[in-house]
Image (cartoon, grey):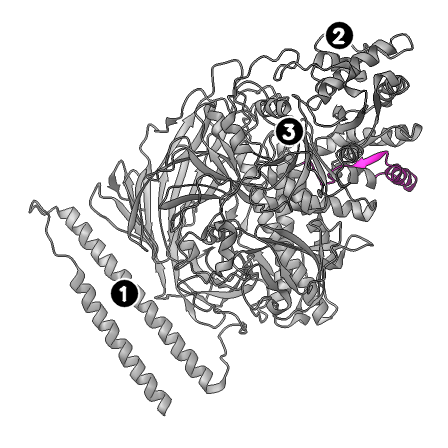
Amino acid sequence: MKLSRQFTVFGSAIFCVVVFSLYLMLDHIDHSKNPNGERIQNGQLGILQDKIDHLERLLAENNEIIGNIRDSVINLRETVKDGKMFPEGNMSQGDLELLPPAPALLPIHSEDCQFTARTYSKAADGVQMLDVYDLLSFDNLDGGVWKQGFDISYKDNEWDNEPLQVFVVPHSHNDPGWLKTFDDYYRDQTQHILNNMVVKLHEDSRRKMIWSEISYFSKWWDNIDEQKRDAVRRLIESGQLEVATGGWVMPDEANTHYFALIDQLVEGHQWLERNLGVKPKTGWAVDPFGHTPTQAYLLRQAGLSNMLIQRVHYSVKKHFASQKTLEFFWRQNWDQDSSSDILCHMMPFYSYDVPHTCGPDPKICCQFDFKRLPGGRISCPWRIPPQAITDINVQERAQTLLDQYRKKSKLFRTNVLLAPLGDDFRYTEAVEWDQQFENYQKLFDYMNSHPELHVQAQFGTISDYFEALRKSTGMDPVGINVGQLALPVLSGDFFTYADRDDHYWSGYFTSRPFYKRLDRVLESHLRAAEVLYSLTLANIQKYGQPNDYPAVDNYKLLTEARRNLGLFQHHDAITGTGKDWVVVDYGTRLFHSILNVKRVIVSSAHWLVLKDKQTYFHDPSNPFLQMDDVQPSQDALPRKIIFEVHEKPRLLVVYNPTEQARMSMVTVYVTTPKVRVLNALGHVVRAQVSAMWNDASHTAADLSFVAQAAPLGLSVYQLMEGMEPRTEAAKYMFLQDGRQISISELEHFRQFYQQDAAPVHIENPHLKLSISTTAALWKMRLKEDDSEHLVKVEFVLYGTTSNKDKSGAYLFLPDKEATIYSPSQPPVVRVTKGPLFSEVTTTFMHITHTLRLYNIQGVEGQSVEICNTVDIRGETNREIAMRITSDLNSKDRFFTDLNGYQLQPRKTMAKLPLQANFYPMTSMVYLQDSSARLSLLTAQSLGAASLKSGQLEVIMDRRLNQDDNRGLGQGVLDNKITANSFRLLLEKRSSAEEETAPYSYPSILSHMSYMYLNHPLISMAVNQRSDNPSLTPYSPLSASFPCDMHLVNLRAIQSKEGGGPSEQAALILHRKGFDCGFSNRNTGLLCTTTRGKIHLEKLLTDLKVKSITPVSLSLMHTHNSDADPQEISLKPMEIRTYRLQLS
C-alpha cells in the first residue's frame, strides 16, 4: 500500500513539472515583428512553422523523459513484485543490457597526464628530423658522378691499420603484385628464383642470399617436396640463407594502419616459427616510398635488432652522408629513454639496384652487374658493359671496384661496408647465379690474397653485416647497451620522399582511394571477427559440449583474410601504384575476405547469443543471422539490405567491436516507416525514420536508433511493425541557389520551410551549426562555453603541370595552386531534421557532400560527421580536394598521424614546392592555436596538407592520363564512385603544449571518436526463415577497458598440427598517449584511466584466464617476467603482446 502511495505522489509530481514546463515554453515563443514592420507572409509562416517544430521537439523530449520515468516505475514495480521481469518476445534478460549513465566529468588519474605534460629536452647527440628540414636548403646541385651528392676522395693508406671489411649481400626484390599479379609473378619468376637458390647456394658454401617476402616463400614451400625443404633448412642453419624482416610483405609505410602492419608481421613470423623455426633479426625495406618510425618501433617490439631503409629524400641522404649519420639509432619521438632504439642503416644512393649500390659512380658500378654482360637481355645505360673476370683483367677490375667500395665507405663511421647485389626479380635463371657468383668470387679471391690492398671482401647476409658493424664499434651483438655510443640517435620520420628534382611522391597518399577505404573496412571486420571467434572458442570450451560450430573452417577463413589483408599492405597495393588488372586482383581478394569474415562474425555471434546452446545449428547456405549490408562487387560501394518487418517481432543483434561500453547510432533499412524498436528489457527505444533517397520502392525507410552496447558485447533488439509515438519521422527542406524548392514525391514525410536566404541551423546537445544556403560556409558553436568558430568547407581542383614530367600514380606535380570547384549548375541542398540526427546534403555534379550531427549525449554527438561521395570518372588530369578553412591561428604548423599510431608535427615550408607540403594522413590531421584544436579524423588514408594558417586540405581522388615514369607504365584512369568519411572535432584547449616539442597527442575524446568512426557497431538481423529461438545479450567484460587502453587484437593462434586453431590466442594491447589539456566534460564515456594497469581476470565476466605469458610483438620471443602475470601493465604508447589461454 505504502509503495503504491509513493507511486501516486511521484506521478503527480511529474505531471505538474510537465504542465509547468509547457507553459514556460509557450511563454518563450517570440512575438516580435519584422524590423521594418512589413509582414513577409511566407517568412512569417516559416518562422511560425519553426516555432511549432521547436515546441514539438520540446514535447518530444518531455515525452522521452516521461517515457523513461514510466519505464523506470514499471521496472521498479515488476522488480518489487517478483524480482524478475519477463520481457515480451523471445529475449531473455542479460545482466548488463542497460548501461549506467556516463559521468559528467571523465575520471582521469593525474599520474596519467604526466607522460604528455613533460617538458621536452633534446638529446645532446640527437638528430631531430624537424631540425634537419629547417636546416636544409634543398638546392639540388649537380654533384658530379654522384649526381645528388658530392665528390668523395680518400688517401691510399687510410686502411693500413684496420682493413676494409666488405659484405656483398645478394638479394632479389619480389613485389607481391605490381606489373603482374602475385600469382603471375610467382608462376613466371619467383618460383624459379627460389628453386635455383636451393641448387646454387649448395654448390658453394661461401655463397649467401637474403629473402624477405613470406607471402611468396610460403606459396613456394607448399609446392616443394620434403627433400627440398630439408635442403632449405640446412641453408638456413649454415647461415647461407637469411630471412630478413619476415613479414608477409615489405609493407608501404605511409598509408598502412598499425593494426595491419602488426598483422602481416605476425602472419609472417608465425609461419616461420611453424615451418622453419626461424627468428628474423634484421629488417630490410629497400622499396617503400618514404619511411615511418612506427615500423621501426614495431620491428623493435618484435625482437629485431637492426633495420635498413632506402627511399629517403635525396637532400636528406646527401646531408646525412656529409655528416656520416647514415647509420644511427632510430628512437621514437615520444620515448623518454632508449627503450625504443633500433640500429638503422640508410642506403646513401639513388636506388637499390646494382649501379647505385657498390659506390658513388653508377657508370662504374653497372660494370659489376654481371647479369648485364654483353649478349644478355639488359645492358648498361651508360654504354660501358661489364666484362667477365679473367686472370688477365682481374687486377684492374678488382682495383676499379675497390675504389668504389672505398669511396662509399668514406660516408660511414666504421670500416665495415655494405654492398647489396640485386634488383627486382633477380636471379631467375641459373645462368645469372653463375654470372654474378663466379665473377664476384674471382674478384674477392684476388682482393683477399693481396694484403697490400687492406681489404677483406665476401658474400654475406644482412645480419652478417650488422654483426660485423656492432663488433667494430664495440657494441652489444644484438641489443643497444654500448659503452661508448659510436653512432648518433635520430628521431622523426622520412616523409615526403623525393627521388629527384621536384618529384615528390605525395600522389600515392591518395591514388586509388576506393581501395584505401576497402582496406579499412576489411581491417575493422577482421578485427571484429578475430575477437568474436576467440571468445566463441573459449566459451565452447567452457560449456564443453560437442557442437556444430565450424571452428576449423572459420579459422581457415580468418587465415585467408589475414593473408589477403597482409598482401594488400604491400608497397604497390595499398599505395594504388599497380596495373589496373592487378588492382582488380587485390580488390577481389579484399572483397572475398570481407564476405568471409562476415561469415565468421555471423556464425560466432549466433553461438554466443543463443540461450540454449544445444539448439545451435550451422547452415552456411542459410545462416541464422544476416548482415545489414552487402557489397555487390569488388569495385562497388556497399548497399544496405532492406529488412522485412511485420507484426511478429524481428530480432536484431548488435555487436560492439570496441572494448568500451558505448551508445552509438544503429541504422538499418526496413520495409515500412511504421516501426517500433524494443530493447532486451522490452522497453520501447526512441527511433527516427528517414526517407531513403536511393530506393525505388518508396515504402522502405531508413530506421535509426541509439543502441546501448556493452564492451565487446552483443545486444539484442526487436523491430516490429506498428504505430509508435517514440518512433518519429524526419522532416525535410530543399534549397537550390539559396531558394526553397518543393519536392512532390515525399510520402510519409513532411517538408518544412523557412525564410529564404536565412542560414540553416542544425544542432545537438554539444554543437550548433549555422550553415549558409549554399552549404559552403558555416558557424560552429560549442555549447559548453558558447564559443563560436567560423568553418568553411569547399572543394578545390588541381591540374597537372605542363612540363615533360606530369602527375601520375606516384607523383603529385600540380600546375599551380588549387582553383575553387564551382560547377555550372547550382547544387541541390537537402536539409533533414529529426530527433536523433539532422543533416545537410549538398549534391554537386561530382560530389555528394553530407554534414551530419548526431543528437547523442557523448562521443558521437561531439563531432560533425562529413561524408563525401566523389565521382570524377569524366575528368581529365584532375585531382579533387576538400578544403576546410577555420579561424584558428595555426600559422605554418599542423599535425598528421603516422599509421594511426602516433602524431608527427609538420611545418609547411615556403622553400619547398606545394606538393612537398602534403603528408600521409592515416587516421587524423589537426591544427591548433592557443585556445582550440580542430581535428579531422578519417576512415581512410589520404594525402593532407595545411597550406595556409587555419586551413586543412585533403585530396579525395585523382584521375591522371599519363604515366609518371616510375615503372608503372600507365596513368590512373580506373576511378570508382568513392565514399570518404570523416569526423570534424573542435575542442577547447585548457593548457597549451610547447610549440617546439617534436610530439603531440590527441585527446581521449579524439581517440574515441576515431575508434567509433573506424569500428562502427555491426548489426545483424535474425533470418526470417528461422523459428525464433530464445536469445540473450552477451557481455564478455564486466566493465570497459581503461579509456587509454586499446585491444588491438585477440588473434587465435594456429595449432601445431593441421590448419585449425590451438587453445591459445595472441592478446595485443596498446596504451595510447593522450593530451590532458582538453575538456573532459560530457564525453559520454564509461571508462576511467588506471595508470596503464589491467587485471584481466577481474574484467572477464564468465571466462577464466588459464595462462598468460608476456611475449614479443609477433610471439617469436618469450619474455621472462617476475611480475604477477594476471596484472598487465603498459607504459604510455607501448604495444605489447601476451600469449593467452582462456577457459
| Secondary element type, mark 2 | loop
Task: Tell me the element at label 1.
Answer: helix
Circle 2 or circle 3, nearest the eye: 3
* Disc 1 versus disc 3: nearer the observer: 3
> Disc 3 designates what residue?
325
CB atoms of marks 1 and 3 within 8 Å: no
- The amino acid type found where label 3 is placed reads Thr
Please state, as top left, top right, bottom left or bottom right, where the N terminus lies in the image: bottom left
Question: 316 or 800: nearer the eye?
Answer: 316
Marks 2 and 1, the one that precedes in the sequence? 1
**Where in the figure is residue 574, as x and y percent of width and height?**
60, 36
User: In the image, residue 75 lies at what x, y percent?
Assistant: 43, 78
Above or below: residue 43 compared with residue 643: above
Please name the residue shown 79% across and 33% down the image.
Answer: 468
Regarding residue 191, the answer to whether it shows in the image is no
Q: Residues within 10 Å of mark 2 (few under 14, many from 20)?
A: few
Of residues 883 and 52, the one nearer the viewer is 883
The magenta stretch spans which residues?
A: 223-250
Q: Locate residue 1009 relative to residue 47 in the image: left or right.
A: right
Q: Report the residue that reaches farthest toward the left.
A: 37
Report the amino acid beneath label 1: Leu
**Could you tell me if residue 936 is visible in this image?**
yes
- Is 934 drawn above or below residue 105 in the view shown? above
In magenta stretch: residue 1107: no
Dot label at residue 59: 1
Residue at disc 3, secondary structure:
loop
